[in-house]
Image: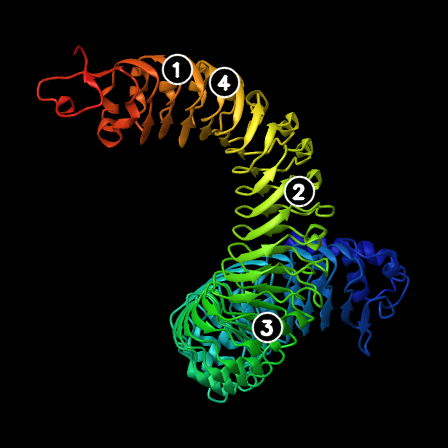
Amino acid sequence: MRLVFWHWFLVFFMLVSSSWSLSSDGLALLALSKKLILPSSMSSNWSASNATPCKWNGVGCNERNRVISLSLSSLGVSGSLGPEIGLLKYLQVLSLSANNISCSIPPELGNCSMLEQLDLSQNFLSGKIPASIGNLKKLSSLSLYYNSLSGTIPEELFKNQFLEEVYLHYNQLSGSIPFSVGQMTSLRSLWLHGNMLTGVLPGSIGNCTKLEEVYLLYNQLNGSLPETLGNIKGLRIFDATSNSFTGEISFSFENCKLEIFILSFNNIKGEIPSWLRNCRSLTQLALVNNSLSGHIPSSLGLLSNLTYLLLSQNSLSGPIPPEIGNCRSLLWLELDANQFEGSVPKQLANLSNLTKLFLFENRLMGEFPENIWGIQTLESVLIYSNSFTGKLPSVLAELKFLQNITLFDNFFTGVIPPKLGVNSRLVQIDFTNNSFVGEIPPNICSGKTLRILGMGFNHLNGSIPSNVADCPSLERVILQNNNLDGPIPQFRNCANLSYIDLSHNSLSGNIPASFGRFVNITDINWSENKLLGGIPPEIGNLVNLGRLNLSHNSLHGPVPVQISNCSKLYSLDLSFNSLNGSVLSTVGNLKFLSRLRLQENKFSGGLSDSLSRLDMLIELQLGGNILGGSIPSSFGRLLKLGIALNLSSNGLVGDIPPQLGNLGELQSLDLSLNNLTGGIEKLGSLQCLHALNVSYNQFIGPVPDNLLKFLKSTPSSFNGNPGLCILCSAGDSSCKGDNVLKPCGAS
């Protein structure tokens, strides 16, 4: 204590010796400014030559020239708040918000016993909240939000019957909410969200009968919500999103004043409480991602002020009540990912202000009401993964605000409105897996904002509109499994495209060289079409390409060497074409390849040692080509080769290299229809084989014991090798009855 006394004495002696006329509050402020760094525009008139600091920037005084307020918010103040703050005994307002103040809150702040408003929000304060702030018995407003404060909330802090506003949100506070929260009987606003608080919400909160706002979201609170919440008759806002609250909603409000009631992303169970019908001022009801069950109460239709009704990701069942159509103020109706059944009530068309309708992933069925498409304010309609039927009316194309319409996995039929996209700035369309017919609307990307176009697995015909190929916003195009024909259009302006699937159509003509402009593409699937010509050398521009599938077309010519520039390629499928030349040394540079399918082409040359550098390969398909030479021993280094190795129907010669026995994860091996010689005993160590074919070669000698199972399951796998035989022992069933192979030593 003596050291502390002499410290303060020396501070005041030095200040007083140079400014005998300045008041004690002024001296304290000057001392405070040594660490609390004010911008020059503010500190310019903080002068020791003044008798009082009452005319200093940011300082307010009473009639006795005592400092009662220090207001320096949003002025670029930096540094730290020193202990000298505790010398301002008459301070009533301290506002330092929205600055760059760091370090901890000094415990001496608790000496400012007259303080009524304390605002240190939006700074870089750290450390714990001093328990001494609990000494500020006149404090009515406490704002410490948007800092990096840690530790627990002091019990003493909440033992203040005059506190009306507590804003501690977005810090790093931990521990539980103090039970003393119930002593803040004047409390109106309690904002604790965005921390790491744990434990239960104390039942004593029911003593805070003047509470109007409670924000607990984004914490780790658990347990049941206390029944005593029902004592807070004037509660307007209760938001406990993203905690771990459990149990049922056991409290109730008879004369309900709630305007916002949000319990999303918890573990609440039971039914939606019937007392909500009393909450005629309710504008937002959100119970997303809980374990709620039962039906939606039809009485929710009484809530005429409701703008958000969010009940998705629960286990709610039964029909959607037609009374929801009475909630004429609804902007957002979210009922997705539940177990709702039956048809969509046509009364939903009465929601004339609705912008978002989410009904996806339910058990809804029947014809989707056409009059819903007439709601002019609609922006997003997500009704996928149900069993809806019906057609899309032409009025859909007139919705000026429509951005997202996602209908996949339903049973919609008919023609897509031809003018879709003309009047709206569409962002996402996904009609995949329905039964639409006709052509793709020609102006679907007129707004130049379309990011996702999904119309795969329908019965669409005609050509791909040029409007799609000239859409700079496009990121994903999914048109597979339709009846589209004509050429692939020249993609002139699709630099943002990352995924395109045009497979299983009847597209023809050459691959346009303009596809080299897909600089951000990661996935191309144009398989199962009628494409002709060669692969353009511009493929080398696709440096982000990860998967390329051009299989089952009529492509010919060599694979361009520029493909080696596609260094991120992990899956390459060029199978079932008429490609030729020597490709293996080129693809051997693609070190991330895990799947290489080149079967059923006209590739020639020998099996290159460079393939052994592809140590990520899990599948290698080279069958049905004109490859010659022997199997390189270096193939034994492809240790991840697990799915398949297919070298069938080529002109390979020589013995199986012993190193092939190192492929311990290999499940399928096909060496059939070659001119390979020698024994197959090297294959005896392949313990994971599920499929084997060595037929029509010139193998000789005994079949290893672990391969005899294939004599029973697929005996034809050994045909055409008269030199192969079975080693028989007494009682060995493998040598009895009909067999494609003779016992070893038999004539």
Eye-nearest disc, 3 or 2? 3
Eye-nearest disc, 1 or 2? 1
Q: What is the secondary structure assignment of the residue under circle 1?
A: strand
Label 1 and label 3: CA atoms lie apart by: 64 Å
Mark 3: amino acid:
Pro
Residue at x 33%, y 22% (from the top left corner): 694
Q: What is the secondary structure assignment of the residue under circle 2?
A: loop
Q: Is residue 98 above or below residue 368?
A: above
- Which class describes the residues within 10 Å of circle 4: few (<14), some (14-19), or many (20+)? many
Nearest the eye: 157 or 495: 495
Labels 3 and 4: the sequence-earlier one: 3
Residue corresponding to mark 2 = 520
Q: Which mark is residue 675?
A: 1
Residue corresponding to mark 3 = 393
Label 3 and label 4: CA atoms lie apart by: 58 Å
Mark 4: amino acid:
Leu
Mark 2: amino acid:
Asn
Q: Which mark is residue 539?
A: none
Residue at x 36%, y 30% (from the top left corner): 668
